[in-house]
Amino acid sequence: MITVIKRNGRTEQLDITKIQKYTSAAVKDLSNVSQSELEVDAQIQFRDGITSKEIQQTLIKTAVDKIDIDAPNWTFVASRLFLFNLYHQVNGFTGYGSLQTYFERGEKEGRILFGLKEMYNLDVLEKHIKPERDMLFNYLGVKTLYDRYLIKDRNSDPIELPQHMFMAIAMFLAQREEKREEWAIKIYDMISQFEVMLATPTLSNARTTRHQLSSCYIGSTPDNIEGIFDAYKEMAMLSKFGGGIGWDWTQVRSMGSYIDGHKNAAGGTVPFLKITNDIAIAVDQLGTRKGAIAVYLEPWHIDINDFLDLKKNSGEERRRAHDLFPSLWLNDLFMKRVQEDGIWTLFDPYDCGALAAVHGEEFNKMYLEFEQNEALIKEKVKAKVLWKKILTSYFETGSPFLCFKDNANKANPNDHYGVIRSSNLCTEIFQNTEPNHYKIKFIFENGDSISYEEDELVTVDSGLVKPAKKVTALDSLGGLPIYVVEKEKVDGATAVCNLASINLSRVNTKEDIDRIVPIAVRALDNVIDLNFYPVEKVKRTNMRSRSIGLGVMGEAQMLAEKQIMWGSQEHFDKIDEIMESVSYNTINASSDIALEKGAYPEFAGSKWSRGIMPHDHATAEVINLVDRGGLFASTYEWDELRAKVKRQGMRNGYLMAVAPTSSISILTGTTQAIEPVFKRKWFEENLSGLIPVVVPNLSPDTWAYYTPAYDLDQRVLIRAAAIRQKWIDQGQSLNIFITLDKASGKYLNDIYMLAWKLGLKSTYYLRSQSPELASDVEDRSMECVGCQ
């Protein structure tokens, strides 16, 4: 007699019919899979004392190994078998327990926020939980859910199931709504049906005691030692709680610059970036991966050449920062000088730091004045030579990411309140930031203090008039000896990304977009108020602008299922129609919430308040990429919306951004963000090994419409991005894919010049591969978890 050891340690006689019950359920209603094939190919070696876990793992591995282009449904067989196993891990039986029991267990383990369940009638919510929606997961999706998102106990065993997770997230996000049950159910339906998916930090942490929900942060460093080291602390705190970081370093003086009147005293940006690199390694993201920090520099900075060499494998290692992500903040004047084969002048921010805070004609005027000023430290280079070095580095290392300063700022909806100085780690967020400002603070022995601007003139008791920065503890003011002189920090602004993505493979009609976007906008707006902020300055910034980033994913799947070729005119027209619908509904929903809850504090004076919409910035060249008839053949009343926004206000200062979505695309079983597919079949590397993946819904009908990214003319990707950008107030995370046989300086120049000319705000990675050595394994080592 063969006995089987169950999970709880109990033994029972082997019953083949029990195994057949699970294998039958796993293949039910799936085409081109077979129960008998699964059981035969598993070749389970039954022996006395075999565990039920061994049997289940063997069946799962068998199904996974059978996933292929001609039999993609094996991924759902593997997923179901995995879920059956998960149900037993969590509950000890196949199926769901009560919502009440789930919350009580989570609270006991110290993982679920106390008091959340008391806000709701759990009996009402229980009736709306749909366990059958678990069947939407493919194998890689449910494995990703298990590895990254499900709450686990101290022994790393899962204590929640997918639908309970989705409901608890919805409850967390709806907790301050007047009709909280109603909104919790709407949010639950939206995410559990994979219509919209929240970004990884929100999925992981909403409902928990550690409710850090934001994806990444954007800040700026001033040109003083206090500001630089305060920035280090801020980056460390943000990285500690799992945020990706984009940070502007343009104002930091260059190598050989002045310090306190001494020339050649400054070490430039590189030594400080080296420390930033070490922070990324030392303050990792919860021990799972090192911190992720993108560092930004403008191309007029004298340190630009050293900056481009940061990731080189040769040269002095002390001047390398292999773990950072260098990014350039390119202005129009530089791009025009490249076009004209002109001379480009490099400056020291010690003299010309004001260039970082201006753009457009104001930048051009100031830059030309600095070029004529013979008293300034400067270097001259050929613009094309520098551009070639930038593109060469981009091709060889995948960086620097290229972002376009003037494109970003001319379309900035909050240009009345600041300037956009950089993007984030994944180059889709464009919001105002401001470095900290520092005053001189005189502290007296009695504890009193007084502060002045650094260059403000102060008359000390001796009668001398000095700039505040030259006053020392040997001076006295108003009869009181100065005890200590120090710098006083005045907080700047560090921007925040709160993200979610519409799944276009499920939501792509006007009716569905009209229905789903208001729910998504409300959920994201609630993230702002419910989020844990590691730094007070970050919360103050987010509360002033109330920024969110609603994007899209699954574009390639949608096109394939509609039998639309990537890059065709039909593709351009379709995505224009969809993005208009997303844009209109997002703006409309934010205005409706503003009427209900109040407009964001910086609304007055914004482009929103002036009735200026994102597509008002589109050039004729971009508009002419599509022809839907008339003025875009719009199905929406934009003039009515302009009037409404002026009247009611906007709840959110920034609204739309297309993030990379790698993890959540995998979770929901769709294609990544706005990209063409990597291949029709590839392998994902996982802790369990290599997992075969086939594009969604692959069939003879969709095969030809899944064009691999490396097979496309990349200028098509740029044009498609320009069409999307017309409707988006922030940006897109846009990768470019080049095979070595197609690579040339001219081709790269054409791609990135076109991106600039068509108004794109950024490009992300330049991914390159040799056609002979092309791997079937998707490389995700460089991707940011936060924006996914």
Image (cartoon, rainbow, N blue to C red):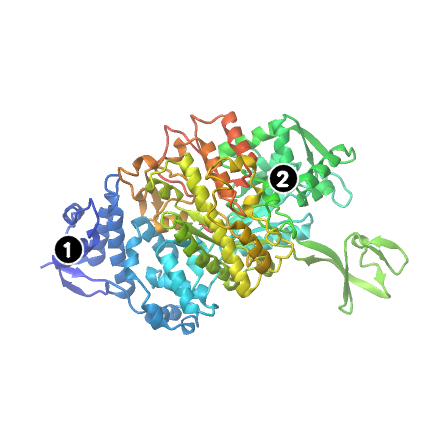
* For residue 24, side relative to residue 188 (left or right): left
Cα separation, mark 1 vs mark 2, equals: 64 Å
52 or 527, nearer to the observer: 527
* For residue 74, side relative to residue 663 (left or right): left
Residue 349 can be seen, yes or no: no
Which residue corresponds to mark 1? 20
**Quadrant in the picture for the N terminus:** bottom left
Mark 2 burial class by Cα count in 10 Å: few <14, some 14-19, many 20+ = many
Residue type beneath disc 2: Glu
Q: Outermost residue, left direction?
A: 1
> Helix or strand or loop: what does disc 1 sit on?
helix
* For residue 338, side relative to residue 509 (left or right): right
Residue 298 - label: 2
- In the rendered image, which quarter is residue 192 located in? bottom left
- In the rendered image, which quarter is residue 16 located in? bottom left
Where's residue 49, x and y in %? 16, 58
Residue at image location 79% in from the left, 52% down from the top: 455
Where's residue 255, x and y in %? 68, 38
The tag earlier along the polypeptide, 1 or 2, is: 1
- In the rendered image, which quarter is residue 155 located in? bottom left
* For residue 265, side relative to residue 317 (left or right): right
Where's residue 588, x and y in %? 51, 55
Residue at image location 54% in from the left, 53% down from the top: 640
Residue 669 can be seen, yes or no: yes
Where's residue 242, x and y in %? 49, 54
> Helix or strand or loop: what does disc 2 sit on?
loop
